[in-house]
Image (cartoon, rainbow, N blue to C red):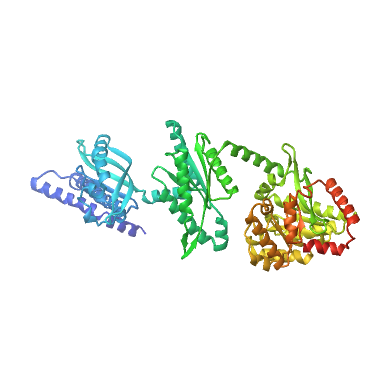
Amino acid sequence: MPFYFLRNQLQRNRQTLLFGLGFVVLSMVSRRLFDLPTTPWTVHIFPLFLGILTSIGINRRSQKRRLRVLDDNHFLRLYHSAPIMLHSMDGDGKILHVSDHWLKVLGYERHEVLGHNLGQFLTAESRQLAHEEIHPKFFITGAIKDVPFQMVSKKGDTHDVLLSATAHYKPNGAFLCSQTVINDVTEKQRDEVRIRQLAYEDALTQLPNRVGLEIILRRALASSQKNNTQLAVMSLDLDHFKQINDTLGSKVGNLVIEQVANRLKEHVNAQQVIARTGGDEFIIVIPDKTSAATLRLNADILLKRLSEPLSIHHQELFTSVSIGIAIAPQAGTDVDTLLSNANQAMYQVKRNGRNSYAFFTRQMSELALRKLQIETDLRRAVDNNELELFYQPQVCGKTQLVTGVEALVRWHHPNFGLLSPVHFIPIAEESGQIIQVGYWVFRQACQQAQAWKRQGWNDLRMAINISPRQFQDIHFINKVDNIIEETGIDPHRVELEITENILMDSNQFSLSTLTDLKTRGFTIAIDDFGTGYSSLMYLKNFPIDRLKIPREFIQDIEENPDNCCVVEAVIALAHSLSLGLVAEGIETEKQRDFLLKRCHCSIQGYYFASPMTLPAVSHYIAANRADDLQDTPELSDNALSTAAVSS
């Protein structure tokens, strides 16, 4: 073991020992030549020790030199292979070194970059910025950080970068070179643009969305207030767009929205802004030309342009639009108020028949507040027993006998007093509360019909209105069955009045539901026939028993020949299809006589009786029946029921 250790030490330090022995030989030769006194110390030990020390010093200097070369090479390799963009420049701006990642990002070869001025790889704007501002500052301070530049790749693509650099100087203070780190933020900025687009822009039309609109409108309002000028907002909503979406699908609906958006873009100027805030809802912000006359002209142009047919998959589709207009500061000085008031004006147009425009007024705001209060209070009306049924008699035109009554709901509002259906049923329909109200009416009417049966009025038919939302309730049939079982009423004594729109909204569903009702024995009547989307096909295919001629056709039937023709056509249609008829709104003897000369029908209107409370209608029916028993031969229950339905 000692032998091998000694041998390893000799091999490892062989150069140093040889160097020391060389000094010993040199010492001995020099002593001989110059005849100097010799001692073991001077001849052997000191030269050997001196030689070893000299060898160690030489080796250390060589090793440091080799390490320095290795460090330089290692640093250069790290510099080139670093996954960031690096370059070094001299005092003239020429590139001395560049990292591989720098070359990779911009697509250059090393020989195309080294020795060239950095300005060759910058855009003209960045080159000017570097020359006029950045370089002078850099030579004074010796450092810059995160300076935005734009670099140009070999393919001509622009890269947004942040440049940071540090200067290095010679011992005498002269500039040696700069070391620069470049952070490519192109993708980051693109991502930020995408995020901004998703947050503030509608993906389908590339118009501002609701969030983007609020920012734009807030700035426009601030500018308007500062300059003491007006600003107008137009709220546009397509009419019957849901039918297009439901019938032709969402893809066609999206194409319609895109074409409408393109037409709106053609209409506005550079100062005006269009936004899409919902499915078929658009907003136009008009900071200029806000006089009422100019806005009316703009609205007329929009109505005409948007009523022109759209070409979708070689098929023509027709649309129209309802427009509400609100002008700041009169209609509001903040974003929410102004948009809300423009929408109120638009909804007013919808209620008045669509395809028009309206300016916001204070009366609309008052109506909106009243509507909100009614909608809120209606949620508690059933639980608080605030609803009451009124009844309007239906009289057989031939016998003058009361054959049925129509149940009509009234509301004893705690603040507004007694409200007729026209004041709250549309609100209930819109909010969905009509379902709860509708089932309450159905139950109360059936209970009252049973009470009259116990009084001996077995033939009295109860007419109950069914709202579209109630009819489309998936639990409708089950709830009807529960009420029938609960009250014990015979469905043959109940007439359900539905609107034509119910038949239009969902063909198969409506047919299935009506068939279920007919199977149970209910009589089905079409209310206000001719005011909706009338179709002979629906009358032919659906199990309908009676048509109700609406009040609008009866009102001026004596003077208006057109109304006469319409009523006669409805009568002829009912006879040809073997359907019964009920005429609403009979207020004069002439109106009654006009109808009785042309058909045998049931008659309902103020000429006979207005909607009455339960005690009043019970008294009216009792009196009518008493008079009839004196003047008319007694009719069987079956005969009266048949006459009521057939008439």
Residue 52, can we see it?
no
Q: In which image quadrant can residue 370 be found? A: top right
- The one nearer the camera, 60 or 352, is 352
Q: In which image quadrant can residue 270 be found? A: top left
- The one nearer the camera, 278 or 461, is 461
In percent of width and height, residue 276 lies at 49, 49
Number of marks: 0
Residue 94, can we see it?
yes
State left or right for residue 152 relative to residue 492: left
In percent of width and height, residue 199 lies at 48, 48
State left or right for residue 272 relative to residue 415: left
- The residue at the point 57 percent across, 59 percent down is 243
In percent of width and height, residue 551 lies at 69, 52
- The residue at the point 43 percent across, 31 percent down is 226
State left or right for residue 415 relative to residue 46: right
**Quick one: quadrant of the N terminus?**
bottom left
Q: In which image quadrant can residue 13 be found? A: bottom left
State left or right for residue 377 relative to residue 304: right
**Quick one: quadrant of the C terminus?**
bottom right
In percent of width and height, residue 299 lies at 48, 46
- The residue at the point 55 percent across, 41 percent down is 340
- The one nearer the camera, 467 or 608, is 608
